[in-house]
Amino acid sequence: NAGVTQTPKFQVLKTGQSMTLQCAQDMNHEYMSWYRQDPGMGLRLIHYSVGAGITDQGEVPNGYNVSRSTTEDFPLRLLSAAPSQTSVYFCASSRTSGSSGANVLTFGAGSRLTVL
Amino acid sequence: GQQLNQSPQSMFIQEGEDVSMNCTSSSIFNTWLWYKQDPGEGPVLLIALYKAGELTSNGRLTAQFGITRKDSFLNISASIPSDVGIYFCAGPYMDSNYQLIWGAGTKLIIKP
């Protein structure tokens, strides 16, 4: 069982370039999300989705786009990369059930992005 | 806005020592979550707390949901080398079922 798979693991971009971080899960989880992790700041939610065709913004959505055409995949797009987007990005998924909502997250191993 | 303050920021401990860390907020939370992140990996859920006053254990780990609902504590007994990593507390943002807010983490380092 692969869980949550993120690609690429490392990426270097120049300012203004675009790219897509891929995320796939094989657990049939309804909920998927993208976080960024910066030193000393914990994790901050970028975008999330509660099912195919449904996406919503998190705490820091500016500069990022997402779509959810299937239950399994939730790609994160950077349309015009900026140095401030240098970070480690994590995709996470969860069932949505009962009072616990989408709290029991399964994370991918992360994608380290550097924007020069 | 809502914030979670974790302390200490980092801890240097000897193998075998007990460890305590906490997480506080100025607002009430109805759920407290504790995750651990190993180097180069994503966080993994350790313990979830859903009721004020709740005390829950997972092996050598014990977490408590503070009675005021504004804090939570995580204790690790008899630490071992594989306990190193970053421990995060998290809770639902504005009572959302789908958005979590995270503390900045407590980094645990074992002295050689």
Image (cartoon, coloured by chain):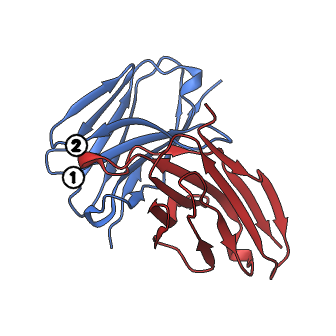
Q: Helix or strand or loop: what does disc 1 sit on?
A: loop
Give the residue displayed 74% in from the left and 52% down from the top: A7
Dot 2 corresponds to which residue?
Answer: B50
Q: Which sits in the foreground, A63 or A73?
A: A73
Q: Horizontal and vertical percent for residue A25?
A: 59, 46
Determine which of the numbered discs, if any, sits on residue B30 in the image.
1
In the rendered image of the structure, the colour used to display chain A is red
Question: Could you tell me which quadrant the N terminus of chain B lies in?
Answer: bottom left
Q: Is residue A116 visible?
A: yes
| Lateral position of residue A23 relative to residue A19, left or right | left
| Lateral position of residue B69 relative to residue B85, left or right | left
Quadrant location of residue B37? top right
Give the residue displayed 64% in from the left and 66% down from the top: A76
| Lateral position of residue A43 relative to residue A22, left or right | left
Rounded to the nearest angstrom, the CA distance separating label 1 from label 2 is 6 Å
Q: Which chain is displayed in blue in the rendered image?
A: B
Contact? badges 1 and 2 (CB < 8 Å): yes
Q: Is residue A42 visible?
A: no
User: Relative to A59, does residue B12 appear above or below in the rendering?
Assistant: above
The amino acid at mark 2 is: Tyr
